[in-house]
Image (cartoon, rainbow, N blue to C red):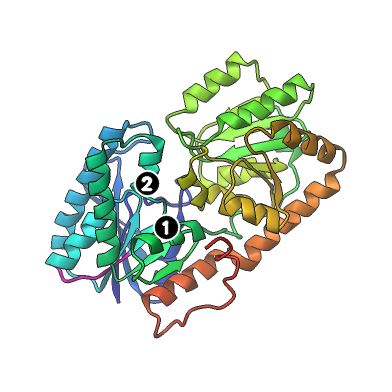
Amino acid sequence: MRIFYIHQYFRTPDEGGAVRSYHLAKGLADAGIQVEVISGKNIHHYDQQWIEGFKVHYLPVSYDQRFGFFRRVLAFLEFVRKSRRLLKKIGRADLLYVSSTPLTTGLIGLWAKKRLATPYIFEIRDIWPEAPIQVGAIRNPLLIRILRNFEKKVYDQSLSLVALSPGIAKHIRQVSPQKKTSIIPNFSDLDRFYPQLKSKDLLERWGLGDQLTIAYTGALGQVNGVEELLGLAELAKRKQKNWQFLIMGEGSHRELLIRDAQQRGLNQVRFFPFGSKEAVNQLLSIADFAWISFAHLPVLKTNSPNKFFDALAAGKAILVNHKGWVYQLVKQHELGISCLPGKLDHCFQQLEKMENDKSQILQMQINARSLAEKYFRKELAVQRLLSVIQPDKYPPMQGDEVYILTA
């Protein structure tokens, strides 16, 4: 079986960032499927590489998280155009596995179905166009109607759909109720991330102490809510706590956050450059809590953030700033505490108690790693994807009750 895996932002663990497609493509290749990834990259010419048993076609499509809305749209459409051209050249596949965002990748699936008679499975990582609508990036009523009709068409024309969370699956079933929808969340790499004792050498190298430490590792954009972590840091400073706050990532709001921290005099907040998964693992190794946050928009409650699953694998207690699927997992499995809007003082008080009694933090960390091992191993995600692609050969797995928590 030959599968073309379409993902505009494919990355390897050494590059860092979202590596879901890397692990799924590798898992499919290990199962004997011929996998070819088509992705965009900030390069001048087409490139091709073999990575872990599968081929990656890199198309020269510039993209940066700091791009404005319209420049992003141009990059999305350029990727669609160049992907179509490549698909004409490299022969026919048995199936396209098309990953969104952006929703424009659906144009590739629709085109391949019509022109090449190739069916596609569509994976929804984030709900588009609802996300940019709620953020305010798309406001024109006519454009909103066109995009929602396009979303429905992409779903309806697919062979089946894959959602990354119960909330996303619920949205899909409202838009396209007749389509089969499977839930395959993001997942934990238990080999790359694991519980570790705080390294004295690492603390000394970075000029840090062994006090209560909260880390954020992820995108620093408009919707990521990291400014609320600065609010917690400011409260800790006011209460004369020497807690440490570590922020690793890139994005359009990075410089704004750095300036904000400087203006508030938050010397206990440290910023680290975007790094590989190994760099993320190092940072998490000296943290007690991982901060998981988003802006307070209904659509963002459905997210399945990579940073959450990395933190679970690393055995970190969780601080979550929004309600939704992640919040419910944290509460149900006692993974950490919430830091919701208007309840910053309550969150601080809980942290203050735990600072003096680390046993509760330790139990949360044990619970986090246990949940990752039980439900969110990358091997389970690969098996679930195989059951979607080849159901006759790989029957659906049982025991997915954690996935339908809010469905």
Q: Going 59% across and 16% down the picture, which residue do you hit? A: 262
| Residue matched to label 2 | 130
Q: Which mark is residue 171?
A: 1
| 3D distance between C-alphas at marks 1 and 2 | 10 Å
Residue 282 colored in magenta in the image: no
**Residue 391, placed above or below residue 276:** below
Q: Earlier in the sequence, mark 1 or mark 2?
A: 2
SS of the residue under disc 1: helix
Depth order, front residue of 213/105:
105
Circle 1: is it few (<14), some (14-19), or many (20+) Cα within 10 Å?
A: some
Counting from the top left corner in percent of width and height, residue 193 is at 61, 54
Element on which disc 2 rests: helix
Does 117 lie within the magenta span? yes
Residue 172, placed above or below residue 273: below
Amino acid carrying mark 2 in the image: Glu
| Magenta region | 116-121
Q: Residue at x 37, y 34 (%)?
A: 136
| Label 1–label 2 contact, CB within 8 A | yes
| Crowding near the residue tagged with mark 2, few <14, some 14–19, many ≥20 C-alpha atoms within 10 Å | some
Between 63 and 300, the one nearer to me in the picture: 300
Q: Residue at x 56, y 33 (%)?
A: 226
Q: Is residue 209 left or right of residue 281?
A: right
Dominant secondary structure, magenta: loop
Counting labels gives 2
In the foreground, 48 or 99 = 99
Residue farthest front in this picture: 141
Residue 395 percent location from the top left of the image: 46, 82
The residue lying furthest to the bottom in this view is 392
- Residue 289: horizontal and vertical position, in percent? 69, 42
